[in-house]
Image: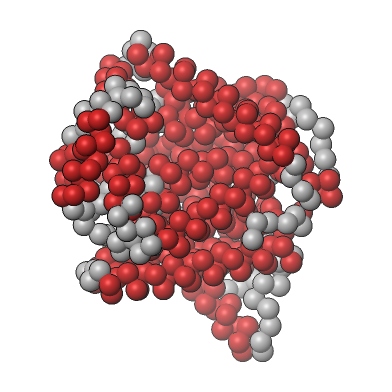
Amino acid sequence: MKSLNSSLEKRIFIFALFSISSFRFSLYGQFFLVEVLLFLYFLSFLVSKMYKGRSSLMDTSTVESLKYRKVIVRFFLLLLVSSLVDGFIFEASFTDQIKGFALIFFTLSNFLGITQLTKLNLDLLVSAFCGLAVSGILGFFFQPNDYAKSEVWKFGFSYSLSYLVILFLIQKNRFKFLRYQYFLLAFGFFAIAMGTRSLGSCIVVTGGVILYASRTPKKTSSDMQRVGFNRLLAVAIIVAIFATLINSFYGIAAKEGYFGEKLKGEYLIQSRGDYGPIVGGRVEPFIALVAILNSPILGYGYGADSTVQIYEKADNFFQLHNYDINLADIQRKNEGNIPQHSYLLNFWISYGICGLFFWMYFLKTNFRLVITEIYLARPIMPLFVFVSVLTGWNIFFSPYGAGVRIEFALILSLTEAVISSRRIKVAQ
């Protein structure tokens, strides 16, 4: 690939590259043009290194970011091995084995390709996120999926516009001004009112963190080498308060019908049981949890079929706690597979306990980095807080499909760039 000398040219090139992230083709599952290009780029980089002689593949990394990258790569290699082993043990179909292997392989190759392409430059990564956001809008018009056609805001524009709002705020440090902080909070509540409760809640939490960060004394990297318990506790309390307020706001508004009769009916059904909408609104992860308790070490392999016993146990739980759940409809929607709707459970069921350990490592590392980034108050802070909060939610309550591979690879690269730019120790 021809070298790009101008910083502006690099940013334009990377923006253009990621603006086609939504364009895909089918071959034993979904594959994206961008990730094929990233794989070819990284492959050409490896060949170039081998031709010139053995040297580090991570020349731009600091010691700490290099440690982080090594841990991520080792985890993904273990997941690839687990994919093959589980596929053999559970006699998965050839298609399922390809899909399970590709999910991990392309996430890893995307991460390595992005990291080498951007050289951990935060400005270039911001351009990549901007391109990713624009690609979501372009994809809706040129290659929409069935979900986007049926729910335009939720699956068509909400994620893209949320990213664009955050990216707008980090330009010229707009997020430090009170009017923009209120604008972000207002946009979060707007997203909730439009039916994207989890996304809107993550935006509101991000806005609350920015409000808090803008009113705390700025510290240096050397001050933040160790995150104290008091700081952890303070941010945890803030997040808990905002989560409670958001839940109360949505519950009251939904019951009164302010979001429309459809959302009112959905909320009343979901909140009918003993644990409210946290269970009623996220049924699939609890069914998957029942399944994983029966095979916590090996999991079941990618695309595993559910069993009658799994649904019987789940049905007993829902009935015991007064939930009226149509399990037959859920089984039909998941085509007989174990329903997951959770990054963590997806990996745990598909690749065994190594999948659980990976997400625990990610949460531990990013949560610690978020806390320190709040007190450093750097320009990248709002974007990093937003993707960390959003991914934290998705780890427990969203499916890890093919479309996540590029976004999550960008988040991994951003995390490494944050580590590299301030040389702070990460979890091992």
From this view, report whether residue 17 is shown above or below residue 187.
below
Quadrant placement of the C terminus = bottom right
The answer to which image quadrant residue 314 occupies is: top left
Left or right for 317, reference 77:
left
Left or right for 339, reference 209:
left
Q: Is residue 119 visible?
A: no
The answer to which image quadrant residue 388 occupies is: top right
Q: Residue furthest top?
A: 256
Identity of the residue drawn at 44% across and 25% down: 192
Position in image of residue 332 (x %, y %): 16, 45
Q: Nearer the viewer, residue 231 or 19?
A: 231
Position in image of residue 336 (x %, y %): 18, 52
From this view, report whether residue 293 is shown above or below residue 62.
above
Identity of the residue drawn at 50% across and 45% down: 391
Quadrant placement of the N terminus = bottom right
Left or right for 205, reference 104:
right
Q: How is the image coloured?
A: secondary structure
Identity of the residue drawn at 65% across and 26% down: 181
From this view, report whether residue 179 is shown above or below residue 403.
above
Position in image of residue 159 (x %, y %): 46, 39
Left or right for 97, reference 9:
left
Q: Nearer the viewer, residue 47 or 197?
A: 197
Q: Is residue 159 visible?
A: yes
| Count of marks, rendered view | 0
Identity of the residue drawn at 39% across and 44% down: 398
From this view, report whether residue 28 is shown above or below residue 418.
below
Position in image of residue 31 (x %, y %): 36, 62
